Amino acid sequence: MEEFLNNISRYPRYLISFTLGIFLTAISPLLPMMKRPTTAIAAVAFLVSVFVFLSFTLRAMLELNAA
C-alpha cells in the first residue's frame, strides 16, 4: 500500500513539470521578439485582448451577468 501511495504522490509533480515544459517550449521562440518595444507592446495587447474575448464569451455562454 505504501508503494501505491508513493506512486500516486508523484502524479502532481509530473503534471506540474509537464505543464511547465509545454509552456516554456511555447514561449521560448517568442522571447527574442520581446526585446523590441513595438513587438512587446503588440504581444501584450494581443494577450490582453484574447483574455478579454474569452472572458466575455464565457460570461455570455454561462449567462453570468455582472450586477
Image (tube, grey):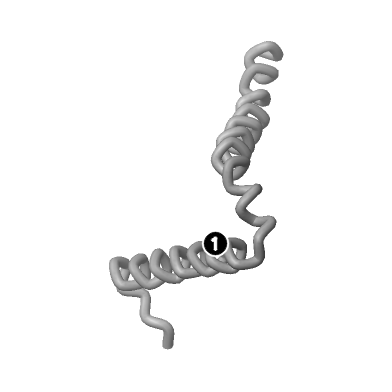
Tell me: residue 48, above or below residue 33.
below
Quadrant location, the N terminus: top right
**Which one is nearer the viewer's eye here, 44 or 53?**
44
Image side of residue 47 versus residue 33, left or right = left
Q: Residue 3, how many percent across, how many down? A: 68, 11
Disc 1 element: helix
Residue at 65% of width from left, 32% of height from top? 17
**Which one is nearer the viewer's eye here, 65 or 24?**
24
Q: Residue 30, how many percent across, how many down? A: 58, 48
Quadrant location, the C terminus: bottom left
**Which one is nearer the viewer's eye here, 22 or 67?**
22
Tell me: residue 22, above or below residue 67.
above
Choose top left, top right, bottom left or bottom right for residue 43. bottom right
Choose top left, top right, bottom left or bottom right for residue 22. top right
Q: Residue 13, how many percent across, how many down? A: 67, 30
Tell me: residue 9, above or below residue 49.
above
Residue at 48% of width from left, 65% of height from top? 46
Image side of residue 26 versus residue 36, left or right = left
Q: Residue 45, how many percent across, how many down? A: 53, 69
**Residue under circle 1?**
43
Task: Using a 10 Å C-alpha cutoff, classify the residue at mark 1 as few (fewer than 14 neighbours), some (14 to 19) or many (20 or more).
Answer: some
Residue at 67% of width from left, 25% of height from top? 9
Amino acid type of the residue tagged 1 in the rendering: Ala
